[in-house]
Image (cartoon, rainbow, N blue to C red):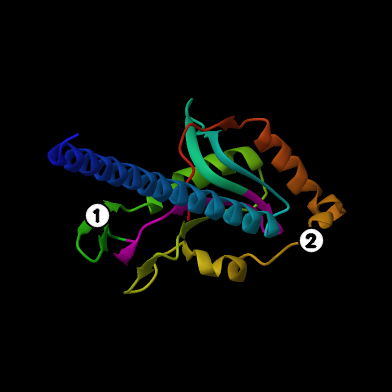
Amino acid sequence: MSTSDISIFFDSQWIWAAVLALFIAVLGFFALRLYQRRTRRRTLLARLQRVAFAAVHQVLVPDMMGGFIHIDHLLLTPRGVVILDTRRVAGLIFGGDQMSEWTVMGPRSRSTFDNPQPALYDRIAAVKGLVGEVPVEGRLLFSNVGKFTKGVPKWVMMLNDLEGQFPLVDRTLISSAPFDQFNESWSRIQSQLRPSPHQFTNL
């Protein structure tokens, strides 16, 4: 084998080693991202379980017009039924009750998304149609990777504030007499639910 052949051989070996290293690095990156997503999901679900007597996630609820409406998280709490519409929006968020679009300013980009409040009101109305007299409320739950810099719009709640607005509950109390109506309404809701095809929002 000539010197040039040996050089080509070792060059090709280095190229394949570099390609393999790059492949492993990319695979590791995506594996880490997947692990982080699953960890955030488990953490969020555990927190929601602690503030609710019962909870269901990623479901479709009848919209009272012959169709269905998606709900990220539906909780039964001591205050009644709570709807959570979750959002992971990174950057500085500018939004208001009267604005049709909210703006997100990132380090290198600017984007907009529809004001989520009207959709939340539709979800509240749909659930109210199922539960009767049990109170129903909703929140737009935003991840801590975002920040509202000029005031927080109505019904918006940051993830850090979850337990502040909805304290931890003793789940054994749900079987007590004061919550009989809550139990009946929750059973009525569950009988109407369908699994939703929407992807889980990781906060």
Q: Which mark is residue 191?
A: none
| Residue that lies at the very extreme toward the front in this rendered image | 1
Q: Residue at x 49, y 54 (%)?
A: 36
Taking 189 as reference, is 93 above or below it?
Answer: below
Q: Is residue 148 left or right of residue 37?
A: left
Q: Is residue 179 left or right of residue 195?
A: right
- Residue type pointed to by label 2: Asp
| Residue 96 seen in render | no
Secondary structure mostly seen in magenta is: strand
How many numbered circles does the render carry? 2
* Nearest the eye: 83 or 30: 30
Q: Which mark is residue 170?
A: 2
* Nearest the eye: 49 or 25: 25
| Residue that lies at the very extreme toward the bottom in this rendered image | 150
Expressed as whole percent of the image width and height from the top left, the position of residue 70 reads: 48, 38
| Quarter holding residue 192 | top right
Label 1: few (<14), some (14–19) or many (≥20) C-alpha neighbours in 10 Å? few
